[in-house]
Image: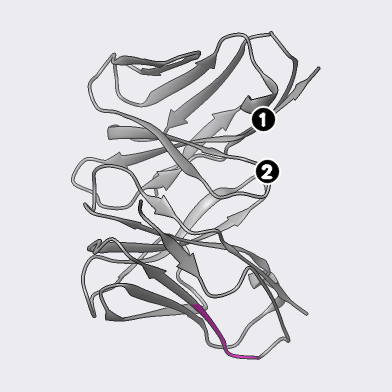
């Protein structure tokens, strides 16, 4: 079945440092979504990417969808303590209606 | 504002008990989903429903069943709870099946002893 892996599993950074999480799928995705889950909370949708090579920005967050539509990345510039949480990618395969989530990257930001 | 609610935040059950987890959404969404979340494994889809009385198996349906008698309500049933079903259970809904945002409930932390 489809697998979506994320690396790293954990990342500790100092406030102000950059952070990147990578998402890799075993199959081609029709679109990819990113979610953030704060400690003790539930996943909250951040963004959806659809086109090959697409890049979208939300303030300090930059999302990329790979050319082959099998990988994606989320980059946070100058992390803040409010960025703490677990970031999940999730993708649909072509024609499929099941969203497969990645394994998640837990980000901790230290002052 | 979309709201997805789950019947309990924390639940403790004994092995062999029948367990019902309820989920209600208030945005008239066609699609509803049940996931379980375990450390290092992300969210795994148990079952989903794209219409009343319709259901489809997700990636890990074994040991679970579901019921959707009304559009706004989606129930997850553990017929005979086992310790390996101790987990966080998350319900979600979305207006479209293979596109767009899923809205999650707060989750139910189930412990089976």
The residue most toward the front is: B1
Question: Which numbered circle lies on residue A84?
Answer: 1
Circle 2: is it few (<14), some (14-19), or many (20+) Cα within 10 Å? Answer: few
Using residue B103 as the reference point, say whether residue B28 is left or right of it.
Answer: left
Q: Is residue B20 magenta?
A: yes
Tag 2 secondary structure:
loop
Q: Residue at x 46, y 28 (%)?
A: A24
**CB atoms of marks 1 and 2 within 8 Å:** yes
Q: Which residue is mark 2?
A: A39
Region rendered in magenta: B17-21
- Measured as percent of width and height from the top left, residue A19 is found at 61, 15
Q: x, y (%) of residue A18?
A: 63, 10
Q: Is residue A103 placed above or below B91 in the rendered structure?
A: above
Is A56 magenta? The answer is no
Chain letter of mark 2 equals A
Q: Position of residue A42 (x, y in %)?
A: 55, 50
Q: Please, what is the dominant secondary structure of the magenta stretch?
A: strand
* CA separation in Å, label 1 and label 2: 8 Å
Position of A9 with respect to A59 (left or right) is: right
**Is B109 positioned to the left or the right of A46 in the image?**
right
Q: Do the residues indicated by labels 1 and 2 lie within the same chain of the protein?
A: yes
At 25% from the left and 61% from the top, the residue drawn is B29
For the point 64% across and 91% down, the residue is: B17
Q: Secondary structure at mark 1?
A: loop
């Amino acid at each position: 079945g489809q697998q979506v892996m994320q690396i790293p599993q954990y990342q500790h950074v100092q406030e102000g440092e950059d952070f990147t999480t990578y998402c890799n799928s075993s199959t081609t995705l029709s679109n990819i979504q990113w979610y953030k889950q704060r400690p003790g909370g539930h996943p909250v949708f951040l963004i959806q990417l659809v086109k090959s090579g697409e890049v979208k920005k939300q303030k300090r967050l930059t999302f990329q969808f790979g050319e082959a539509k099998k990988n994606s990345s989320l980059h946070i510039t100058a992390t803040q303590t409010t960025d703490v949480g677990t970031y999940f990618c999730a993708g649909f395969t072509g024609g499929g209606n099941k969203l497969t989530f990645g394994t998640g990257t837990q980000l901790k930001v230290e002052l | 504002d979309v709201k997805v609610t789950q019947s309990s935040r924390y639940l403790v059950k004994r092995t062999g008990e029948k367990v019902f987890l309820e989920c209600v959404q208030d945005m008239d969404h066609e699609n509803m989903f049940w996931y379980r979340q375990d450390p290092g494994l992300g969210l795994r889809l148990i079952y989903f429903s794209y219409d009343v009385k319709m259901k489809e198996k997700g990636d890990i349906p074994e040991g679970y069943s579901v019921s959707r008698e009304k559009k706004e309500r989606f129930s997850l049933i553990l017929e005979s709870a086992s310790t390996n079903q101790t987990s966080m259970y998350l319900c979600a809904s979305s207006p479209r099946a293979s596109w767009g945002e899923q809205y999650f409930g707060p989750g139910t932390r189930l412990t089976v002893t």
